[in-house]
Amino acid sequence: MSIVEVNHLTKKYGTTEVLKDINLEIYQGEVFGFVGHNGAGKSTFIHTITGITNKSAGSFKIMGISDSQLNHAKKRIGVMPDVSNLYENMKGLNFLRYMGKLAGDKRSKPELKTLMKEVGLEDAAQKKIKSYSFGMKKKICIAQALLGNPDLIILDEPTSGIDPESTINIRDLVIKLKEEGKTVFLTSHNLDEIDKVSDRVGILSDGEIKKLGTPRQLKEGIAAGVTISVRTKPILQKNDIQKLSEKMNTDIIFMEAKKDYTLLQVPSEEDLPEVSKEIIQSDVHLYEMKVEERSLEDVFMNA
Amino acid sequence: MIHILSREFLDSFKSVRSILIILFITFVSYQSATFIDSNPGLIQEIVKIGGEEGTVYTAAIALIVLILGFLFVFATSHDLINKEIELKTIRLLVTKTSRMQIMVGKFLGTLLFWVATITISFAVIFIISGSWFLKDYFHSFVFLFYIVSFVVLVSTVFTKSKLTMFLGILFGIALPILGLASAVSSKWYLVPFKYLLPYRYLEGSIGLMFVPIIIGVIYLLISVFIMQRKDL
């Protein structure tokens, strides 16, 4: 069942099209990751489907409720805003109480403190938000998105700018939300993060969805070729690879030479025995050769 | 909406400006009422020339509302809407509730603050005179309803709070002058102010006193319409 259904959604600022004819379905209970560079339109997409900005064309439905009736769905959506949108002069706990009331959340003060503890803000309840660090502000934004027990949780860059431990906590939180049957929509620059938690991923570029699918599907779908890392002494350089390519009469692409290994791309796995044989027969000592896993980064770079 | 209303209402009491204005209005009301109360001859003289006893007691507060009302409300609430837009905190609110409810909640919260302020002054007058002058109280309410809705409109149309602060001072000085002048003059260039501003309606029948409320509601509807179309 679709919890978000977007049809031909377009958003223009003046003559600039920031979102171009977006079509997307997000299913109940899935974690959907949206990846894109700065200015790709990720935040505009979130702002449009949450009513912060008005669409220019197209339509969308959230939990079956059309965009013209979006106000009826708001209590069931938890939106993590940008940290700059917080009431800086409010104390953390008071902020959550106020936002909780607006979200129809009946939690008591101790329960809200428990929520703050869950996101790692146990000692910050009575401190003003303006005294919070960037990471703490991120955390209170996440806590705020969870108020009212929403069915759909939208997290805009939840892990950017925060420490590794908190990143792991947020990842665990997203997994926990998924286990509870919630639908999570998150955007991130951290492709590794998206890869770890998302059931499906959309790659947004210049306001268009360039790729859409499970992380596995996307990785399998990028340009043919196998990336391998080769550890040799001395290390193989670009000209060595060119010679190898000519000798084998195959397209072997030199990608980069790092401290003690070289990254190459060969047309297929069938070429690997021949490549290893040729390297062994050359003047270098081969210590290790392994096929590199494709990452979402490769997909993103190919999008 | 009720939560936005109550937050707006309670926050209004937290600023130094608001507290000073409450103290000023209460102090002037108290001083004028005690002065009138200690000079009963003055009341009789005014009643003789057709004035009402209540008007004598509430003259000071009426003058403050009529002449300084715009200035005071702009001073405390000129950024009622645009500050939330500037600071982008409104984005938090619109993800939880409708824009209409935000606007109405803010309007009612601010209006309630001003109603509470004049209620304190009328209570002071009641303690001294022994009467609650309902008609004058309703006059003040109507006037404040009009002013607060006008402030909401200005704060919605102009998105920079510095500009609305400047406009607030300008309107606070110019509108009472234009309003009072248009109420007694028939010069053509004052005619729009005569009908748009609330001054002329306050001295007519009870029915006329609802006209500023209707104009205020129109201002609010325009504000909501503008807000619905804004990208926040």
Image (cartoon, coloured by chain):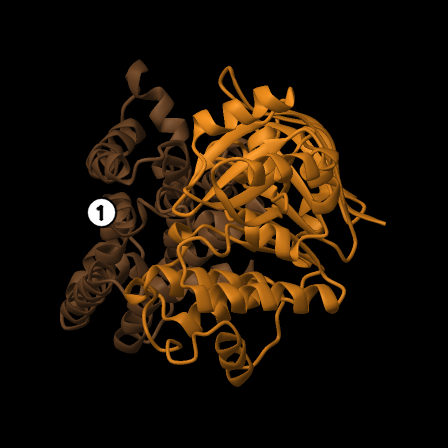
Chain colours: A orange, B brown
Q: Is residue A10 above or below residue A165?
A: above
On screen, residue B201 versus residue A288, left or right, reads left
Picture quadrant of residue A45 = top right
- Above or below, A269 against A8 in this view is below
Q: Nearer the viewer, residue B92 or A299?
A: A299
Where is residue A94 shown, x and y percent of the image? 43, 72
Q: Dot 1: within a 10 Å radius of its alpha carbon, few (fewer than 14), some, or many (20 or more) residues?
A: some
Q: Position of residue A233 (x, y in %)?
A: 43, 45
Q: Is residue B151 above or below residue B174?
A: below
Rendered position, A142 above or below B225: below
Quarter in which the N terminus of chain B is drawn: bottom right
Q: Position of residue A48 (x, y in %)?
A: 60, 37
At a point 44% along the width and 25% down the height, the residue shown is: A239
Which residue is identified by label 1?
Answer: B68
Q: Is residue A214 left or right of residue B61?
A: right
Q: Nearer the viewer, residue B215 or A160?
A: A160
Observer-nearest residue: B75 or A22? A22
Judged from this view, the residue extending furthest toward the right is A1
Of the pair A147 and A220, the residue shown nearer to us:
A220
Tell me what residue is drawn at x 44 percent, y 64 percent.
A164
Chain at numbered mark 1: B
Helix, strand or loop status at disc 1: helix
Q: In the image, residue A18 lies at what x, y percent?
A: 54, 25
Q: How many marks?
A: 1
At x 69% / y 39%, what residue is drawn? A273
Q: Is residue A147 visible?
A: no
